[in-house]
Image (cartoon, helix red, strand yellow):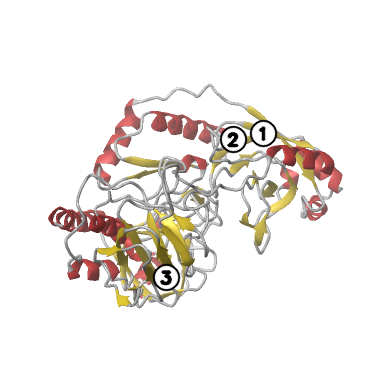
Amino acid sequence: MSRLCHAQVRRWDTHLRAHPPRGVRNIHPAYASLLVNFDPRVRTLAEVEAELRELLATVNPPEPTSSRRVELPTCYGGEFGPDLDEVARLAGMTPGEAAARHAGTEYLVHFLGFSPGFPYLGGPPEALGVARLPSPRTHVPAGSVAIAGGQAGVYPLASPGGWRLLGRTPVRLFDAARAEPALLALGDSVRFVPIAAERYAEIAAAEGARSPAVFTPADGEPAIVVARPGFLTTVQDLGRFHFGHLGVSASGAADPVSLRIGNLLVGNAESAPALEMTLVGGVFAFRRPALVALTGADMQATLDDETLPPALVVAVAPGQTLRCGPARAGARTYLCVRGGISVPAVLGSASTHLASGLGGHAGRALRAGDTLYIGHEPASRPPARGATPEHIACTLLRTTVLRITPGRHADRFEPTQRMALVSTAFAVTEASDRMGLRLRGRALAAPAGGRMLTEGVPLGAIQVPQDGQPIIISVEHQTTGGYPQLASVIAADLHRVGQLRPRDVVRFEWVTFDEAERFFNEQETMIRRWGEDG
C-alpha cells in the first residue's frame, strides 16, 4: 500500500485510459497492479501483452498533476457507527477519542473497487487498525464510513460488508446521472469532518433520495405488460465497459452467446437489450405486434395455448400472451424481440446491475404490472428464416465440464491443489447468483502467507476463499477482491457458467492459453457463419 506503488499505478492508469490499446474494454487499478481486460474478438492475448510490454519499455508516463482534497461530513457513533464503541475499546480509547483520531487523519484514495464508487483509502491511524468483523453484515447502509485492518473506506451503496462501521456520511459518493459518476478518484485526499445528527439530516435532505424513473419513450406506446415476472427477470444486453476504474463491473447477459443468437434470429444487432429470465420464466401480455425468439434454457414456453419451440422466430399478435415456465435444463432463457427492449442507456449500456440499481428497467428486476417498450425496427438485417442448428444449441447448454487456464495466483498454489481442482466434482450451491457461483466439494488449501493485497478480478476467475470452496466470478462481480485466483474459465465457456443452476455438478479441465484461444475462435466462427447464413 505504499505511496510509491500508488504513484506508478496512477500514472499508468491515467495513460492507458487516455490512450487505450485497441480492444481494451476495462482497466482495473488496485494497490500495486492494473488488470487490463480486452475483447478476444478484437485482439489476441499475445498481441495485447506485446503492446503493453512495449509501452512499459518505451513510455514514461508523466506524474498526474490533478488531485483534490475532498471533505466528507460524517456523523460518528450511535446508529450511524455501530462499531465505534468496540473499535475504541480495542484501541484503548474512548469513542470520542477514536472518532477524533479517525477524523484527524488525511487519507489517500488508492483506487475504487468492490462496488461502484467505493474508495479504498490508505493511511488510517495504526491504533485503529482492528480486524474486520468475523461474520459480515448482510446490510450496510449507503454512506457508511468503515475501517478494516490498515484500510479505510466508504460504502457508496447499501450492500453486505464486513468492515467496522464508525460513522456515516450523507454525501452521495456515486450517482450515474452525474457527469462524473464517482465523487472520488485515484490520487484524491480525503478528510472526514465530524457533524451532529441534525446536520446529517439537513445535508441528506439536500442531497435528495432520488428513485430511478420508469422510462417512457416520447413517441412510443407500451408493447408488453408483465403479468408475472418469474423468479428473476431483468433487461440485459452485452454489458457496459470502460468503467472498471470506477468499480463498475460489465454486468450484461450471464449467457451472452444465447443473447447474441436470439438477437440474430429476430434481426437485431447482437447487443440489443432483451429479457433474461432465471430458472422460472414470466408471463407477458403483448399489446403490439412483435417478432420474438427464445434462446438458452428451454422454459416450456407457450403462446396462448400453443407450444413455442426454443430458438424459433415467431410472430406475436396484439392480445396474445407468452408464458414461460420452469427451465428443463440450464438456468437462463432470453426473450429477444425485434427492435430490442427499449430502456435508457446508463453509462453506455441497458444492462441491469442489480446490486447497484444501475440500468435496465428502473435499475431492478421486473415486477408484475411493469410495461415495456420495443425499440425501432433495425435496418441491418432481416429475421432468420428458421431455428438455430441443433448442434449449436447442444454446444451452448453443455455445462458438465468447464475448461480453465491458470489464474493470476496459480503459481502460489501447491501442485496437489492445482490437480485437486480438476480431479474433484463440485456442486453449485443455492448461494449462487449473478455475482458469483459458490461451489461445494473437496476443500482446496489456499496459498500460505495470509491475506493478499486486493487486486482486480476478471470475469470467470475462480477464487479460493479461506474455507477452500471455489467461487466462479460471474457477470455482476465485484471489480476487485482479496482472495487468491487459482484459475480462470476460458472465454469460450463463460456462457456455460451462466447456465449453471443450484445442485448442478461441474468439473474443470486445464487447457493451455493457445487452446483457449482456438476454442474461442472456433465458437465465434460457428456463430458468425450461422448468422450470415440465417
Calculate the distance from the C-alpha at mark 3 to the C-alpha at mark 1: 46 Å
- Inspect this view and state whether residue 26 appears: yes
| Residue at far left of view | 533
Mark 3 or 2: the one toward you: 3
Q: Which residue is mark 3?
A: 281
Q: Residues within 10 Å of mark 1 (few under 14, many from 20)?
A: many
Q: Earlier in the sequence, mark 3 or mark 2?
A: 2
Q: Judging from the image, what secondary structure is the residue with disc 3 in?
A: loop
Quarter holding the C terminus is bottom left
Q: Residue at x 47, y 53 (%)?
A: 352
Residue 458 is situated, as x and y percent measured from the top left of the image, at 41, 51
- Disc 1 marks a residue whose amino acid type is Val
| Residue at far front of view | 319
Q: Residue at x 57, y 33 (%)?
A: 3
Q: Quadrant of residue 1?
A: top right
Q: Which residue is mark 1?
A: 190
Calculate the distance from the C-alpha at mark 2 to the C-alpha at mark 1: 9 Å
Q: Which residue is mark 2?
A: 184
Q: Are marks 2 and 1 in contact (CB under 8 Å)?
A: yes
- Disc 2 marks a residue whose amino acid type is Leu
